[in-house]
Image (cartoon, coloured by chain):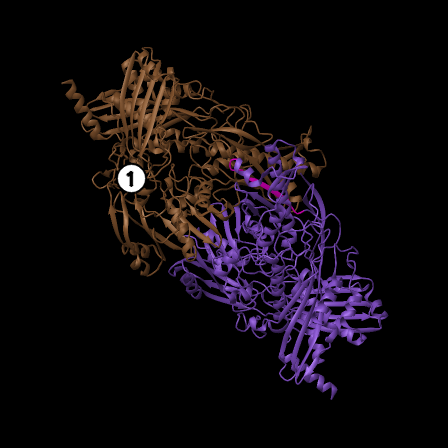
Chain colours: A brown, B purple
Amino acid sequence: MTRLKKTRVESEGTVYEKLSLMEDEELKPWDTETELKIVGKSFAKIDGDERVTGRAIYTSDIQLPGMLHAKALRSPYPNARVKRIDATKAANHPGVRAVITHENIPSLGWLNDTKILDGAARFAGEEVAVVAADEEEMAEEAISLIEVEYDVLPFVVDAENANKVTAPIIQGENNLLGGAPRTYHRGDVNRGLTEADIVVEGTFTTQTAVHNCMETHSAVADWNGDHLTVWESTQSIANTREHLAAVFNLPLNKVHVICYYMGGGFGSKQRAGKHTLLAALLSKITRRPVRMVLTRREDNLMTGNRQATVQHLRLGAKSDGTLTAIDLTSTGEMGAYGTHSSLTEGPAQTLYECQNVKTDNRAYFTNMGPAVAFRGPGYVEGSFALESLLDELAEKLGIDPLELRIKNYAHIDPRSGRGYSSKNLDVCYRRGAEMVGWDKGWRGDRTGSKCRAIGVASQIWGGGGGPPAYAWVKMNPDATFEVIVGGQDIGSGTKTTLAQIAAEELGVALDRISIRIGDTEAAPYAPVSSGSRTTPSVGPAVRQAAADAKRQLREIAAGYIEVPLEQVALREGEFYLEGEEKPRISVEELTDTIDELTILGRGIRGPNPNNAELMTFGAQFADVEVDLLTGDIDVKKVVTVLDFGRVLNPLGAGSQLEGGVVQGIGFTLSEGRVVDGRDGVVLNPNLENYLVPTNMDMPVVDYAFTDVPDPTANNLGAKGLGEPPMIPTAPAIANAIASATGVRIRSTPITRAKILDAIQAAKEVRQ
Amino acid sequence: MTRLKKTRVESEGTVYEKLSLMEDEELKPWDTETELKIVGKSFAKIDGDERVTGRAIYTSDIQLPGMLHAKALRSPYPNARVKRIDATKAANHPGVRAVITHENIPSLGWLNDTKILDGAARFAGEEVAVVAADEEEMAEEAISLIEVEYDVLPFVVDAENANKVTAPIIQGENNLLGGAPRTYHRGDVNRGLTEADIVVEGTFTTQTAVHNCMETHSAVADWNGDHLTVWESTQSIANTREHLAAVFNLPLNKVHVICYYMGGGFGSKQRAGKHTLLAALLSKITRRPVRMVLTRREDNLMTGNRQATVQHLRLGAKSDGTLTAIDLTSTGEMGAYGTHSSLTEGPAQTLYECQNVKTDNRAYFTNMGPAVAFRGPGYVEGSFALESLLDELAEKLGIDPLELRIKNYAHIDPRSGRGYSSKNLDVCYRRGAEMVGWDKGWRGDRTGSKCRAIGVASQIWGGGGGPPAYAWVKMNPDATFEVIVGGQDIGSGTKTTLAQIAAEELGVALDRISIRIGDTEAAPYAPVSSGSRTTPSVGPAVRQAAADAKRQLREIAAGYIEVPLEQVALREGEFYLEGEEKPRISVEELTDTIDELTILGRGIRGPNPNNAELMTFGAQFADVEVDLLTGDIDVKKVVTVLDFGRVLNPLGAGSQLEGGVVQGIGFTLSEGRVVDGRDGVVLNPNLENYLVPTNMDMPVVDYAFTDVPDPTANNLGAKGLGEPPMIPTAPAIANAIASATGVRIRSTPITRAKILDAIQAAKEVRQ
């Protein structure tokens, strides 16, 4: 039996209510007394073999009879309209099956009320025509044969210029997303500043960062009769299906989306991409399967990026360190399309219990590739500003920066006024300090030109998951099991974690469980794998489904033994009768007796029983050495302690944490899209000039988890950890650099040049 | 809730009990008053578009990165042992990744306790080595480089010789399947013969027929880590999975079998083939996907055939036509492997209520390709003998052959003594007679050298389906539905029929339903598509699952409106409250309200509530013209009336019927494997010399169905019709020929030469 429940949902600053289904009898979390046999133990990825041998089938591996390859002609101008386009030569090129332009396609919606291939190019790299041909090379050759005459228009490439009255309008009335800033306040920030003994302020800038997933965006679309099958590298097969259904006006049962394996999304693959819609359209036109796999260059230009921000922040505090005011004005650069700006104000609003907070967030459309979510969107940038300036405040107050954080962190959610389902941030601070040796020397030391210090920063993020999520657990006739989930494993080890949960609940070995994931058709709805939500959303549904399968097994055993259900217990694969010590029959024996017995357990991840805030917390410490002569920055060690409830797979959690730290280091020190302001062209849409960290850049990564089961978050006591490890990295490193060198860099990436310039400037001030 | 129930199962003459799961509350069949909107109406195949455009993905269309192609070296001798084999040159041939022979592979079980590639060739065409290479041509070249020295042994190619004491032993102790004949008797056949006023007897022979499915047997195996995925052209993904799991000692959750589309099986694709096991083994060895698609020649030689039979039959009757004795001795030719002989005795035991029946069935192993089931296995051959000799009896008695059948057909099952769930054979006889104009001229007439007459024959066959079968019905968040079934559509329109059943039960349009079939992983067990059982097994489970989904929808609506479940009715997509005429809310409105609502209904096809025999019946009439000068046989028209309960899709049923009739005509007139007795080699393993009927051979096919819902067979009132239309074709044609020409041909295929010889012989007798 199920029932309906209203839940409160917050998405990008908006709170709304939704109606969800929940189980009538929900499982309680395992209590801390229960000795778990599989959950909480380390397991290597159950699909590791195919991943490391290259046998795993990714979207670009899909081969279908008669499949065509699509390639796009892209505008060289950041703002232009197509005046004339002649695709005759391209259409007559050998192997070409279709050429689509704004002149010959139906109207299909894209973002911000624009249409796909609408004859406008709003950034350099945007599609103006697409060719489908028998071979990729044929499509590329044909592309070069399309003649285009453009109306070249004025353009802007940054938020500052987009806000000028003279700026060309890209979206909306004034290039401002939503037409007005997104603002928030609690208390009275001016009074807070007035009451403060000390006020610090600073302007922080962050760069445009590109996701650079191992696997570029790719789709294979196969339109067959009245239905569409799409293989897509995606963080959400469900969203992709809904998006395709909406654009092509199809019911959901006519759209089938598959993603068996994918090589990273980091926020950039949450719905169908333009390449997906183009592949689907071309398949519809040609009646052939169409493959569109973006190159690294295309991927960097068009599929999204972390928006560049300029944050002006003021903090006020009493001389005892009590924060009295946080005042943030944040500006972001949206690129040409988008519907949400980054949550830079998140940390300012929620990390500390300060009474007076005001935030103002504006995002401006520009003639650049669109900004989208990127691991901890806004929180990475917002934390850089807040946690850097907090260190500056600590210095002025003469208070240990760690103590200042411990003094001020919020004990209940300061935005909603509600308690947390669980919070052990103090443990993170203290444990991390111990691990990194904070007390022995965070201020650092200097040997020759090399100085070294430790920086700290805090992390807050969601990750509590939430409804709706569904799972099914099927028992095969030989008493092995398949977990069926309509979600995806974006590389984070979801399959392994879900198998552990099912194995634990069913009391069987891990290899008796297989996971079916990444296929919308024969699976129930599961949410997008973003917001650190997969495990805490889908995991509880899997446990519930396993429990349902177990109940059915008991019911069948009771029928077989001919006793009431209540008298039958199932433990470790054996059925026991109440009061008896020896089992009556094993699950295998029972299933052998019944012809082709198949069982299906259904599970729903229900809304939380209380109204607690489900958040994750953490503290990160960076031990950094800077060479004052060369500006070289060497991150020696990063210590991270995270608080995200029960740790289901310590090995998997550690891998995710390490990945987050290294991505954080890239953001902090080396990554950054470079644009030529004169022509709006990106200069480094590649991995040669856009510097993603390599193995050589890896510090020692040391970590710990509080591993305290959350008593109310869900039936696992677990929360997510996809984004958390990356969020505090930039300020932890920046704070270490400031302590080591005495100079404060307020702009990422923190490069050698910025360090040397700042040292030089500081010398000039002192002289 | 579910419970267990014991059912009696008969398989190939053996009766056993099995324990099955059933719903606590099973749906009753729709009563005849209920006006059905979708079930019972004609619909074209819902996957017709992809089938006719060639877009449907069959096993041979599967392409995987790094996929290898397997080809077998086949013995030229019908009985030989490999004395020496040297594969060095083959292994060194470009592109070759593996060569397997009996010398280098693990022991893997094959039929009759033999092993795969065991160094023995038991028929000409059997595998002695297999090569996997990058391209099919490379594998073929490599095959020709393998050097083999054989011990060539004596061989037998027919049952008669296999039964001689001097015969080489192929299987068992004496080449006799099971070591002893399969016998049956009721009453006293000798007394029955003694009491008869007239006794007729005859020896009937039928040929070896080859299935010649449009799609040859094919497999693509992909062994990845500890699990195996196999695409297979199969009548049973479940059997194939179980077979692979058994041979390779894997749990079921590590074996995934897929068959999205398949091009006919007719009994020859009921489990993994040797090609499947070889592809899987090669994939395991090479760690690459391996494709093994048989050529038409290979398919004809090794994948099975309808066994040749020699039947000696005696019938005794009173002068009023009452049958007093049926005495059948039947011999079949098994080929080199096999576990079941054909059910030639089935019609003799069950068609007529005769008190004294004795049957004796023996099958002998020979050095030929293995015999397997082929559409109506045994019943096609057995009906040819019984229904031909019955006409001879009618002639001697001077009774209208139709009347003789009406007089004698069984009203309860004469074998078990139990009643039928439903039987309307009398309607078939009378309706068919009317349609063909029996009374006006079954004895025929003659114009010049051309004589023409009508023959009749009866049909009995199973087709009641039975447990276990499961189905799931999933509702998508937009109130469209997916039916999930772990079965397959072997080309008979299963998808369409199942969609109709779900649409009817849910009260939605057909295109709101999609069917997911042909994938063992995310679907429950469904039985093999053989024995005319798919619709009556899986269909009731689908209806039950749809009803379960509907109940859950009502439950959710009740929760939403806040009334008890019992007060909510769901009709045509609208929820009504008891006593109200206007609906409160539609399904779409309800699902719009609830975030991503997904529902899963589960259904089980339970055992029959009573112990009735579930059988199908029919009568077929052939209107045939024979040219006495040339022996040309022209089947002008075939009229068939079948009794298989409720007709779910008249268009689909008609197509199946037409297919059966034409396959029956092929068996009767033109098909037949030809073997050179001197060397045991098949002379016509192809479509040039093995004559499958073409469009030019099609008669007018006229048909009707009794369409009387079976009150107890299952919740649909439906039975199967895959095999029935083929079963009576040979005797109906033979009887027409006898009436037209005065000569009786007791051997299929009935060729021109046999007709002319018989006419000549008859003349000689008369002279």
Is residue B628 on the magenta stretch? Answer: no
Percent position (x, y) of residue B230? Answer: 51, 52
Camera-side residue of B475 and A69: B475
Residue A436, by quadrant, is top left
Q: How crowded is mark 1: few (under 14 residues within 10 Å), some or many (20 or more)?
A: many
Horizontally, is B616 left or right of A236 in the view? right
Q: Is residue B66 visible?
A: no
In this view, the residue farthest toward the bottom is B767
Is residue B596 on the magenta stretch? Answer: yes
- Judge whether B159 appears above or below B647 on screen: below
Q: What element carries label 1?
A: loop
Residue B562, by quadrant, is top right
Q: Mark 1 lies on which chain?
A: A
Camera-side residue of B243 and A410: A410
Q: Is residue A570 visible?
A: yes
Quadrant (top left, top right, bottom left, bottom right) of the N terminus of chain B: top right
- Judge whether B172 appears above or below A617 on screen: below
Residue A121, by quadrant, is top left
Range shown magenta: B594-605
Quadrant (top left, top right, bottom left, bottom right) of the C terminus of chain B: bottom right
> Residue type at mark 1?
Met
In this view, the residue farthest toward the front is B581
Horizontally, is B204 left or right of A320 in the view? right
Residue at the spot of label 1? A368
**How many numbered circles does the render carry?**
1
Percent position (x, y) of residue B259? Answer: 53, 54
In this view, the residue farthest toward the right is B195
- Judge whether B412 appears above or below B676 on screen: above
Camera-side residue of B584 and A644: B584
